[in-house]
Image (spheres, coloured by chain):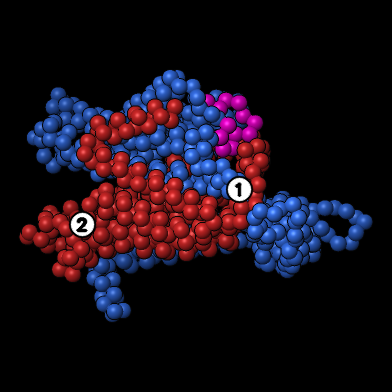
Chain colours: A blue, B red
């Protein structure tokens, strides 16, 4: 069995000679990523907040008389830890924490965990005490990110670099826009500019500086306009969106704009994906057979569209819906029925999914139309 | 509002997709039903991780075999998707536990809507976090997988002399083209969702280090990272399995229903 498996692997990889180049590339990448991860593992001095590494944990169950219905168990954890940074570095600290078996609002700490602590500076007692304000997650995130980059570059070779580059530039633009929004600019206008920026950067970096990239950009923007037009019309016709159930809106008062920009950015990726697939397909057909008729092009464009629309809509469904599971479960455990949640407390994610789906469907004919006009008609007239 | 959007959505699905649109719509409904029952099962107190796995299998089955037919492409995709799912189940379980990703994050818990609810639910929130990660990645994973397998299939149909290694390489080549676009889709969907979160971080004067260690950010970040990881992992596996199936057709004859392959 194992021998057969090894034979298949060697057959898949083919000759070994060309892999020497990638071996060197791999070693370089692994070295860079290891340095980065090691750095994150020892970045205590970068933090202003006190970091404590927990050494010992003792947990004792707490019984609470007022909770009768559920089997929820509560624990009082008392911990001893060592301070890793700042003025009191190396000293012992005593911490208290309350945890529950389901952990909805609290965390259960174990030995060797690292937590952020607010010190209680009380000079009367000799013991240093503090309260836990957060968990240090950056090192795990760094390991995951490094693993992802390593795999990406191994699978996609150089193309992965461009994808990562475009993601980084986009994050930069996004953070700058958030800054501008904080400075008082309207969020909707900002995200309109942001969408333009995203479209150009991502498509140019993924597709390269080619004619079909510009066709893809054009069809993305046109489809986005139509999608938002439909959304805006639907919003004007029925003014019953309840913004109370939007997440993370504490202390903000321009909800309609915020919601619009959320939907705008959320649908952009899917629309770009469809546009780039359609334009590449049409371009390929025109290049291979210059005499191909417009009717045939429309037919092939539709075929390609059939193939991608189902899975693209699925991507949006799962990406949007997965985020609401914890809150829906929490509500259902508080005896709110699933039907009530869907009807009365419509999670905003469902709107995002609907708009994204409409966007995907609209993009199929629009991008076929745009690419036929640009590849076929314009070429003839030149 | 949602009704109007739903009507427009279904209308467009029919106008653009016709017959295929209706199949897409049916499988979408089935997927939504599976998701709803997943939520129901979890709220009944069943183990979230153990419920998520069969639900994911059903979703894969619906999307691949019902929506795209039963053939060499979907068979290869199905095996690769399941393999990646098992791998990532283990990884996300580990990450969920060590990173304390379960529970309602520090920002949401202060909102009125959540603050009114009782936290005594007797379900492990970390396990719910695992099922969130897995349901989040399955759509993208299947998309990447089916694109690779159908592209390799087309290559094989047009040129049957290619050997295993050449088919595998063409699969990887096509896969790297697809990955960029798929990751973009995921990335913007997540970015759009977390726009409000970032604005909130800015308004509350969170520093960079506070942001990257906060539960709110890490929950979003892990979802997108795992989705991208799933896409990256599934591409070579699908390329390998589809080329293996195409080169050893006689072994898989009884599972395959399409005639095209056998009419040489």
Q: Is residue A204 visible?
A: no
Give the chain of mark 2: B
Q: Quadrant of residue B1?
A: top left
Q: Quadrant of residue B244?
A: bottom left
Q: x%, y% of residue A379?
A: 16, 29
**Mark 2 lies on residue:** B71
Q: Quadrant of residue A58?
A: bottom right
Q: Earlier in the sequence, mark 1 or mark 2?
A: 2
Which stretch is magenta? Answer: A244-256
In the drawing, does residue A245 fall left or right of residue A80? Answer: left
Q: Is residue B178 visible?
A: yes
Q: x%, y% of residue B240?
A: 27, 63
Q: Is residue A326 magenta?
A: no
In the drawing, does residue A296 fall left or right of residue B46? Answer: left
Question: What residue is at 75 percent from the left and 60 percent from the top?
Answer: A62
Observer-nearest of A1 and B169: A1
Separation (CA) of disc 1 from disc 2: 43 Å
Give the chain of mark 1: B
Name the secondary structure under disc 1: loop
Question: What residue is at 30 percent from the left and 30 percent from the top?
Answer: B11
Furthest-left residue in view? B264
In the drawing, does residue A68 fall left or right of residue A33? Answer: right
**Mark 1 lies on residue:** B104
Q: x%, y% of residue A136?
A: 64, 56
Crowding around mark 1 (Cα neighbors within 10 Å: few <14, some 14 to 19, many 20+) is many
Q: x%, y% of residue A9?
A: 28, 71
Crowding around mark 2 (Cα neighbors within 10 Å: few <14, some 14 to 19, many 20+) is some
């Amino acid at each position: 069995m194992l021998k057969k498996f090894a034979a298949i692997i060697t057959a898949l990889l083919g000759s070994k000679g060309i892999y020497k180049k990638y071996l060197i590339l791999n070693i370089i990448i692994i070295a860079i990523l290891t340095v980065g991860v090691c750095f994150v593992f020892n970045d205590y001095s970068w933090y202003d907040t006190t970091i404590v590494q927990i050494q010992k944990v003792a947990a004792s169950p707490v019984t609470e008389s007022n909770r009768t219905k559920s089997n929820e168990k509560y624990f009082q954890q008392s911990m001893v830890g060592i301070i890793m940074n700042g003025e009191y570095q190396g000293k012992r600290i005593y911490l208290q924490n309350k945890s529950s078996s389901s952990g909805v609002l609290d965390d259960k700490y174990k030995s060797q965990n690292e937590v952020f602590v607010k010190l209680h500076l009380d000079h009367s007692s000799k013991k240093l005490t503090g309260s836990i304000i957060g968990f240090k997650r950056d090192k795990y995130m760094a390991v995951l990110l490094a693993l992802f980059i390593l795999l990406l570059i191994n699978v996609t070779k150089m193309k992965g670099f461009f994808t990562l580059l475009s993601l980084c530039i986009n994050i930069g633009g996004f953070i700058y826009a958030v800054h501008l929004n904080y400075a008082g600019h309207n969020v909707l206008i900002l995200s309109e500019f942001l969408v333009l920026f995203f479209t150009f950067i991502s498509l140019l970096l993924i597709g390269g500086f080619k004619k079909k990239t510009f066709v893809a950009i054009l069809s993305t923007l046109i489809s986005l306009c139509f999608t938002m037009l439909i959304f805006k019309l639907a919003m004007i016709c029925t003014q019953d969106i309840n913004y109370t159930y939007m997440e993370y809106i504490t202390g903000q008062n321009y909800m309609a704009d915020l919601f619009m920009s959320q939907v705008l950015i959320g649908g952009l990726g899917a629309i770009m994906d469809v546009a780039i697939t359609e334009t590449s397909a049409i371009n390929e057909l025109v290049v291979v057979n210059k005499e191909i008729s417009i009717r045939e092009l429309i037919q092939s464009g539709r075929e390609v569209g059939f193939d991608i629309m189902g899975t693209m809509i699925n991507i949006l469904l799962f990406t949007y819906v997965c985020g609401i599971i914890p809150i829906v479960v929490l509500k259902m455990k508080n005896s709110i029925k699933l039907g009530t949640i869907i009807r009365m407390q419509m999670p905003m994610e469902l709107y995002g999914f609907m708009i994204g789906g409409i966007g995907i469907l609209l993009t199929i004919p629009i991008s076929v139309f745009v690419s036929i006009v640009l590849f076929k008609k314009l070429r003839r007239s030149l | 509002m949602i009704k109007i959007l739903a009507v427009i959505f279904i209308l467009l699905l029919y106008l653009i997709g016709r017959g295929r649109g209706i199949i897409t719509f049916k499988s979408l409904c089935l997927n939504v039903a599976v998701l709803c029952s997943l939520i129901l099962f979890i709220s009944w107190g069943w183990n979230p991780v153990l419920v998520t796995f069969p639900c994911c299998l059903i979703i894969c089955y619906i999307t691949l075999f019902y929506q795209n037919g039963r053939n060499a492409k979907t068979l290869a995709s199905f095996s690769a998707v399941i393999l990646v799912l098992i791998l990532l189940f283990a990884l996300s379980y580990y990450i969920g536990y060590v990173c304390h990703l379960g529970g309602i994050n520090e920002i949401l818990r202060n909102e009125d809507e959540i603050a009114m609810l009782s936290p005594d639910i007797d379900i492990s929130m970390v396990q719910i976090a695992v099922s969130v990660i897995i349901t989040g990645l399955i759509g993208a994973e299947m998309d990447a997988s089916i694109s690779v397998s159908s592209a390799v299939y087309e290559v094989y149909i047009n040129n049957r002399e290619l050997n295993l290694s050449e088919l595998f390489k063409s699969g990887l080549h096509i896969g790297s083209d697809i990955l960029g676009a798929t990751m973009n889709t995921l990335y913007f969907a997540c970015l759009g969702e977390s726009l409000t979160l970032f604005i909130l971080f800015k308004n509350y004067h969170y520093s960079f280090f506070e942001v990257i260690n906060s539960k709110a950010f890490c929950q979003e970040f892990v979802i997108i990272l795992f989705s991208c990881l799933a896409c990256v992992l599934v591409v070579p596996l699908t390329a390998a399995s589809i080329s293996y199936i195409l080169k050893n057709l006689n072994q898989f004859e009884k599972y395959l229903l399409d005639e095209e392959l056998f009419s040489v």
